[in-house]
Image (cartoon, rainbow, N blue to C red):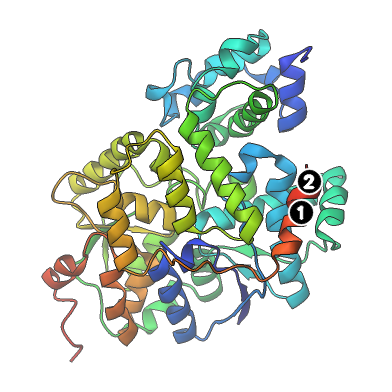
Amino acid sequence: MIKSLAAEVNRLSGQQIELCYHCHKCTAGCPLVEQMTYGPDRVLRMIALDELKPLLASRDIWLCAGCYTCATRCPNEIDLAAVMDALRQIAIREGYAAAEPDVLLFHRLFMGVVKRLGRSHEAAMLGLFKVLSHVPLMNDVGAGIKLVLRGKVPVIPKTSGKTAEVRQIFERSG
Amino acid sequence: MEYAYYPGCSLHSTGLEYGLSTKAVFAHLGLDLTELSGWNCCGASSAHVMSHTLAVALPARNLALAQELGRDVVAPCAACFNRMKSADYYLRTDPVLREEVESLVGFKYSGQVAVRPVLAVLYEDLGPGLVSQRVRRPLTGLKVVTYYGCLLVRPPQITQFDDPEDPQVMAALLRAVGAEVMPWSHATDCCGASLSLSRADVVQSLVGRIAERAREAGAEALVTACPLCQVNLEMRQLREPRLPAFYITELLGLAFDLPEAMQWWKKHLIDPRPVLAQAGLLEPVG
């Protein structure tokens, strides 16, 4: 159980969200705000008010693209992208279903491939994503074929050659 | 000048021509790149969603390899640069995390290795003056806008490179090779990054707006230094006339008249050859 969402977010992100005085600069510059339910500034307020459930179940935390426009402009130097990461980590840990399930699926598949190969591998990633996501199977097939024809999606993965070392970092970092 | 080279995963796949053109241009300019042996993925835009420790530890392993080689490391991909530079920042400023990551990776952080984007090396170590001396085919008549995206310049306390709201380095290099750089509003607006697969609609709308503003500014092409920006710009642009997105190194290679350059154009999802032909840049240099 989380006693104080703000304390937990601050601990995980290294930020001090209490410094926010709601100038809305983050929201004004956010490229994803049109897609969000609350927007960056409300997200900070909801953390402060411990509105755990609606926040962790919201699409907002998954839609942040990590562009750092908010972090660059915040007059109180709050790294809101790091705050969003903390909220995602809490949502995963507490078993919340992601409101943007394909976004989380993408991150999971990506990290799964890196854990096994030490590097990303587009062919494996794209194949798995196609099968497991909600995105219609035939979307992007044309672009996919173009990428293959240009030699940009190698079928045989290039590993780092040190896959055991990389896997160990995954396993030991929890 | 000698550097360690961290290509990252994209330069071996979707950003193939970025890797090829970076190596060709650096070799031509006498800048030695030695690829880190046994490098791993930096964690890109996914590791930090899962765990801060992992997001620092993965690039820290690559920093350790560069440290062993004793050279500053060049990371052409904006995301790789950002992740590695972030790792360096946290290793420098968070002693508790540093100890944990040092034990995870099995190295001792020296803080002696600088993490650098391609643009910084070309601008700071050579400079537009030296770059312009190598030009054999001035890119006169090619109208472009510079598109930085996010991770090369943000967050500035970590990236420590160029101006986060109004960056200038890429334009200076392009002007040095004779291109016409149009002023515009969207140089540092986000393309949607890794939402491209899961929420293609969002990326189409962001990329559409970027391309619209570029056309409005009178540009015939965009110039980037990020493989994810480049593939998003070319794959998620729907409205005609679609603008090709060059890597900065491709245009430098063309201006230096490197023969390899002709192999790069066909790797694009939007063929840039009509734009180059229109400016007379595909003719042999007389």
Q: Residue at x 58, y 15 (%)?
A: A55
- The answer to whether residue A22 shows anywhere in this view is no
Mark 2 nearby-residue class (10 Å; few <14, some 14–19, many ≥20): some
- The answer to whether residue B91 shows anywhere in this view is yes
Q: In this view, does B196 lie above or below B82?
A: above
Q: In this image, B132 relative to B162: left or right?
A: left
The amino acid pointed to by label 2 is: Ser
Q: In the rendering, which numbered label is found on residue A169?
A: 1
Secondary structure beneath dot 2 equals loop
The reply to whether the C-beta atoms of the residues labelled 2 and 1 are less than 8 Å apart is: yes
Mark 1 nearby-residue class (10 Å; few <14, some 14–19, many ≥20): many
Q: In this image, B192 relative to B162: left or right?
A: left
The amino acid pointed to by label 1 is: Ile
Report which quarter residue B269 is drawn in: bottom left
- Residue marked by disc 2: A173
Q: Is residue A168 above or below residue A13?
A: below
Q: Which residue is drawn at 43% across and 24% down?
A: A28
Quarter of the C terminus of chain A within the rendering:
top right
Marker count (numbered):
2
Horizontal and vertical percent position of residue B124: 54, 68
Q: Give the distance between the C-alpha atoms of the residues marked 2 and 1, in whole angstroms.
A: 6 Å
Report which quarter residue B1 is drawn in: bottom right
Which chain letter goes with mark 1?
A: A
Q: In this view, does B256 lie above or below B154?
A: below
Horizontal and vertical percent position of residue A139: 29, 43
Q: In the rendering, which numbered label is found on residue B174?
A: none
Which chain letter goes with mark 2?
A: A
Q: In this image, B190 relative to B68: left or right?
A: left
Same chain, marks 2 and 1? yes
Horizontal and vertical percent position of residue B187: 37, 47
Q: Residue at x 63, y 9 (%)?
A: A51
